[in-house]
Image: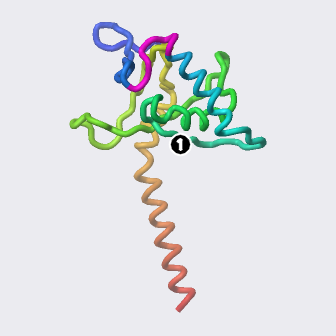
Amino acid sequence: MTVRGRGGAAVVRGPAVAGSFYPSGPDRLAELVGDLLNVSERISGSIADVVAVGLLVPHAGLEYSGRVAAAGWRLLGPIGSAADPLTVVILGTNHGAAWLRGVAAWEAGSWRTPLGDVAVDADLARAREVLEKVLPKVQDEALKAKVNEYLKLIKDNG
């Protein structure tokens, strides 16, 4: 599905730092990523029987932290396929948009990289909207549970 913005144009977030923090040319970028993954094999080795539920990697330019990031990604092994793509949730910092406070999400369309466009998981974005609506109730119930548990402990201990 292609999400359309005003005027019917597809919504695509263009690369903001291509050519600065990583090469802007697809051939050079693919070569660099391949080299980093190959070098990272010596760093990360192999870990058998590990199921990753999250991965924290540095996000400086590939020149600076690419080896360490590649070592983390290598531990995941092959991820996703054209038939069954993996959903990756990327959390990043706001380095300079003074107008942005809190959390923002690119909710539809795609992200463009020199290697091609990557579709946004619109279903996951909609799920986040639902979570935002129910979170206050969950938070209220969790707070009551903690307060009730604490009151029970006080009662039981004197």
* Frontmost residue, 59 versus 143: 59
Residue lying farthest to the left in this orientation: 99
Residue at 51% from the left image edge and 25% from the top image edge:
121
Residue at 57% from the left image edge and 29% from the top image edge:
87
Q: Which residues are magenta?
A: 21-28
Q: Bin the neighbour count of mark 1 within 10 Å (Cα to Cα): few under 14, some 14-19, many 20 and up.
A: few
- Can residue 11 be seen? yes
Residue 74, picture quadrant: top right
Q: Main secondary structure of the magenta part?
A: loop
- Can residue 1 be seen? no
- Could you say where residue 33 lies in the image, as x and y percent from the top left? 56, 22
* Frontmost residue, 24 versus 97: 24
Q: Amino acid at mark 1?
A: Leu
From the image, tell me which residue sits under label 1.
56
Residue at 33% from the left image edge and 14% from the top image edge:
5
28 vs 13, left or right, is right
Q: Is residue 105 above or below residue 81?
A: below
Q: Secondary structure at mark 1?
A: loop
